[in-house]
Image (tube, grey):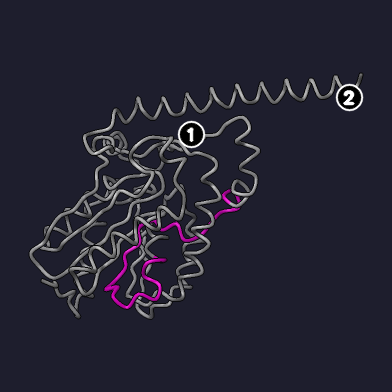
Amino acid sequence: MNALLSSGLAALAAAGAAVVRTASWRAAARGVRQRLGPPGPGGAVTGAEPILLEGSGAVAVLALHGFGDTPQSLGYVATACHERGWTVHVPLLPGHGHSLEAFAASGAADWERGAREALKGLLARHRRVAIVGQSMGAALGALLAAGEPRTQSCVWLAPLISTTRGMEIGARFWWLVWLLRPALTGSDRRSIHDPAEAARARSYGSLPVRLGPQLVNLVHRAVEALPRVTAPTLVLQSREDNRVEGVRTEAAFGRIGSPERELRWVTGAGHVIAVDYGHAAVCAQVTDWIAAHAVAPAVHVM
């Protein structure tokens, strides 16, 4: 009798958890749709489309956005590079810029594949490519640049090339959270201090918890790749970064294999420094670094 009662209560609890989990997911997905709006003609939500700007010069730049974000977060950087006459490609990584369901169905292998395909496309027309990455985009940039002699230079903005204890714990026990909340609200007003830019952001603002291990494993691989990054590398991060701890960035920076590397700090901005207060100065540092290391030009292949 007791066993029957226990199994019945367990089944009831599981059913209740499933109801809560489904309702929580639907609410999160609905919130994303309401905030970002319907998809455009290409499938991506309006404003989240890939950026491809053809230049007149020999330099090519691949810029990679962060986790749950879109090319819009690197729009100012893309424009600044293009104004120098360079070709710029900011791909929309798989699973991003569409729906929370599409995001949850993607993974680290998909994001890396999207980045590598974009690099391959540029290298088909240019002998060398500069790689810019913001947040997770910097981790992807490290994986792409490691051992790739055709990398002209790297610029990493607020790079996610380290993990916190919270990230590690979340990645290990994500399934416990998933039982009741398959998606967590990931938006943080401190990520972008400028309210106008925060309102323009096309990021999801929600995190499917199953992606926690995917992100952490990607960062682990990026950290392992750092000693094989030999291209001149500039790292820029805000002192007020709410996502990436400065002390961890400093430790990871020391692992970069390039003998020519610099770590510079900005202030007055959050994590997404490419659009936040001071983004013009950030863009200037990005383009100056790329220009200074274009001594062996990325000759355009006709």
Along the viewing direction, whichever of 66 and 115 lies nearer the viewer: 115
Q: How many marks?
A: 2
Q: Residues within 10 Å of mark 2 (few under 14, many from 20)?
A: few
Pointer 2 and pointer 1: residues touching (CB < 8 Å)? no
Along the viewing direction, whichever of 228 and 10 lies nearer the viewer: 10
Along the viewing direction, whichever of 126 and 302 lies nearer the viewer: 302
- Is residue 158 in the magenta section? yes
Amino acid under disc 1: Thr
Taking the spot 21% from the left edge, 50% from the top edge, the residue there is 51
Taking the spot 18% from the left edge, 74% from the top edge, the residue there is 298
Asked which quadrant contains residue 37, the reply is top left
> Residue 123 vs residue 58: left or right?
right
Magenta residues, as a range?
142-167
Relative to 233, is 208 above or below?
above
* Residue 115 percent location from the top left of the image: 34, 58
Query: What residue is shown with label 1?
Result: 185
> Residue 27 vs residue 44: left or right?
right
| Secondary structure beneath label 2 | helix
Amino acid under disc 2: Ala
Query: What residue is shown with label 2?
Result: 3
Asked which quadrant contains residue 260, the reply is bottom left
Q: Quadrant of the N terminus?
A: top right
Q: Mark 2, mark 1: which one is toward the viewer? A: 2
Taking the spot 81% from the left edge, 24% from the top edge, the residue there is 7
Along the viewing direction, whichever of 22 and 81 lies nearer the viewer: 22
